Image (tube, rainbow, N blue to C red):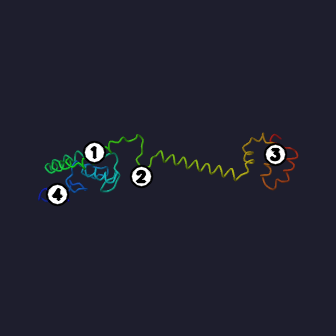
Amino acid sequence: MVMRISADPESERTVSEFSCHCCYEVLIDPTTLTCGHSFCRHCLALWWANNLRDECPECRAVWQGFPKVNILLRDAVEKRFPAFVSRRKQAVLSDPRLCNVLQAFQKHGERPVRRGAVRVNININIGDFYSGVRTALSCMAMVVLVYCAFSADSSYETLLSKPLRRWSADDVTLWVEHMGVWTNQYKETFHREQINGRS
């Protein structure tokens, strides 16, 4: 609820322009997020403490970096509503729960960010992702190798990888067998004549 500072309609409009969308009071230490929305710093800290997510309380956009007090907006609010801001700051500082939440929020912002780390909204570690891809590719390679080993005659596969000049007469006979039924008439001749890869 917006606190009435003056009975003047112009002042009420000004108060609503400088109000926090969490507490609906005049902004105290206004903190502007990357989406453009501004909140009292303690309201944003309470939101973060209750949800543990780095997102805007209004539009749910994830903020980039750690939110800082908007100095220009803070100075404008303090100049326009000095007594009100002073009273609210005292109330925030005298509340131990709010002080603890603000302190935890600040510590959260001071955490070191790993160099080269990529921020992904669903918290996937890029190293784990590549490790998973490597594992999947390794599994696929093993499946292909096992398939090849059991689906083909291993002696014929070995023959094809051997240089032709090293083929024995048995290797030539095996090769002729794999060419098809029409080569059966030549198989006996090749075997009888002991034709090898050097012949």
What amino acid is labelled 1 in the image? Answer: Gln
Q: Crowding near pointer 4: few (<14 within 10 Å), some, many (20+)? A: few
Frontmost residue, 118 versus 190:
118
Q: CA distance from mark 4 to mark 3?
A: 100 Å
Which dot, 1 or 3, sits closer to the camera?
A: 1
Left or right: residue 22 compared with residue 138: left
List x then y, in percent, for residue 58.
30, 56
Mark 1 highlights which residue?
Answer: 103
Could you give the CA–CA distance between mark 1 and mark 4, rounded to whole angstroms? 27 Å
Callouts 1 and 3 close, C-beta under 8 Å: no
First reached walking from the N terminus: tag 4 or tag 2: 4
- Is label 3 or label 2 in front? 2
What amino acid type should be assigned to the residue bearing mark 3? Asp
Name the residue nearer the viewer: 130 or 90.
90
Q: Is residue 197 above or below residue 88?
A: above
Residue tagged 4? 3
